[in-house]
Image (spheres, rainbow, N blue to C red):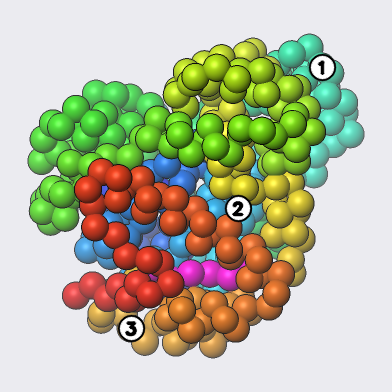
Amino acid sequence: MKLLGITAEYDPFHNGHAYHIREAKLRSGCDSLVVLMSGDFTQRGTPAIMDKYVRAEAALKNGADIVIELPVYSATASAEGFAEGAMRAFSDLGIDCISYGVECGDMPEETVAQIREAASFFAEEPEEFRTLLKEALAEGMSYPVARHSAYRKLTGEDGAFLSSPNNILAIEYEKAMLRLKASFTSVPIARAGKGYHDPTPSELASATAIRKLIIEDSSLSETVPMNLLSLYEEPAKHPVTADDLSGALFSALHGRSWQELAEFSDVSADTAKRLTEASKKPFTWTSLTEDLRERSHTLTHVNRALCHILLNITKDDEQRYRAAAHVPYLHVLGIRKEAAPLLGQLADRSPAPLLVRLGKDMKTLPEDASRLFDRELAATALFSHILYGKGVATTEERVRKFMIVS
């Protein structure tokens, strides 16, 4: 059996995702699809608009054979951490091939070649590059801008493809594969339809546009597979946004010194000091990020910093997660009924513990992995608490039944 791996957020799953799955299966020649999907919090540093089980079910109804939760330490990390965590997990699972999307306009082959060339460059990270990057950061540039500037100066390439979120992730996937000496190959798929951030509704609208439709209580019939309209009907009435977490964020910040805040992942000393001042007055998540963002910090970076404070993810936690020889755990969210034998095969080949019957399986985790998984449980509990406040019935994660989709 040949296994295909896709890393995704599916926030929410839409027609473009269905297209990617169809094309990736066709071009890779793989028999089964393993999806690594972010849980209730995303790489943008904000909560997903729907809970992870709804999004996992959507994937299983549209081509995925099994959906495994990408650990929160990777799911809420920078592009580098997100990609590295996913590639480590796929390596542990014995995947044969991965697929990802690229923004390439009319030149797919040229763009893919540029992506792989850039990945090789960044995997080696020459000393001259590190020097130029440090200088650019010292000038007050944000990390993405500084990286682009240093790359352009050293290679003479325009590097315009570096500005696309999908291409940034594609480079990081390829870079992680090189550094891990991964045995699997990659199949890039050109993005079809609207751009990543395009807010315009259409048949191949972006997730950004679809989240906007959900918040505005508009119809999704044009933008998502027809078999998901009934699945999304109820969750779409209770979308979760970052501002729903404003109260919880206030509690997480209140009474903490800047030195304590600086212990959290993605929180610099400067950001911590500004946070202690900004959080003294009433705020929403959105207003606080606007107060904190500046030329040297992108909005996404600020959101990730706040997310890590909220979820109690420290620099030490992140370091221990990344330093482990294998992914500390992999939580299986659900499987397609016809693909049930795949679960046993993955469990047999993976050195990373697969958590299926959570209440039972989590008790077998080593102490360090168990402590890391506690943060995972807390993140899910917080998201469920927000849903409960919106009148949605929720189930405690430890006793939730494993999802099987026909």
Q: Is residue 148 left or right of residue 394?
A: right
Residue sitting nearer the eye, 183 or 143: 143
- Residue at horizontal 45 percent and vertical 24 percent from the top: 284
> Which disc, if any, is residue 54?
none
Residue 252: percent from the left, percent from the top?
58, 39
Q: Amino acid at mark 1?
A: Ala
Residue 208: percent from the left, percent from the top?
33, 31
Structural distance between the alpha carbons of marks 2 and 1: 27 Å
Q: Amino acid at mark 3?
A: Ala
Q: Quick check: can you spot residue 67?
A: yes
Residue sitting nearer the eye, 226 or 241: 241
Q: If you read the primary sequence from the N terminus, does the residue marked by circle 1 or circle 3 appear first?
A: 1
> Which disc, if any, is residue 138?
1
Where does label 2 land, which residue?
Answer: 73
Q: Is residue 129 above or below residue 290?
A: below
- Residue at horizontal 43 percent and vertical 72 percent from the top: 398
> Which disc, if any, is residue 340?
3
- Residue at horizontal 70 percent and vertical 41 percent from the top: 264
Crowding around mark 3 (Cα neighbors within 10 Å: few <14, some 14 to 19, many 20+) is some
Q: Which residues are magenta?
A: 326-333
Q: If you read the primary sequence from the N terminus, does the residue marked by circle 2 or circle 3 appear first?
A: 2
Structural distance between the alpha carbons of marks 1 and 3: 53 Å
Residue 107: percent from the left, percent from the top?
44, 32
Quadrant hosting residue 242? top left
Say which quadrant the N terminus sits in.
Answer: bottom left
Structural distance between the alpha carbons of marks 2 and 3: 28 Å
Per the image, label 2 sits on a secondary structure element best described as helix
Per the image, label 3 sits on a secondary structure element best described as helix
Tell me if residue 332 is in the magenta stretch.
yes
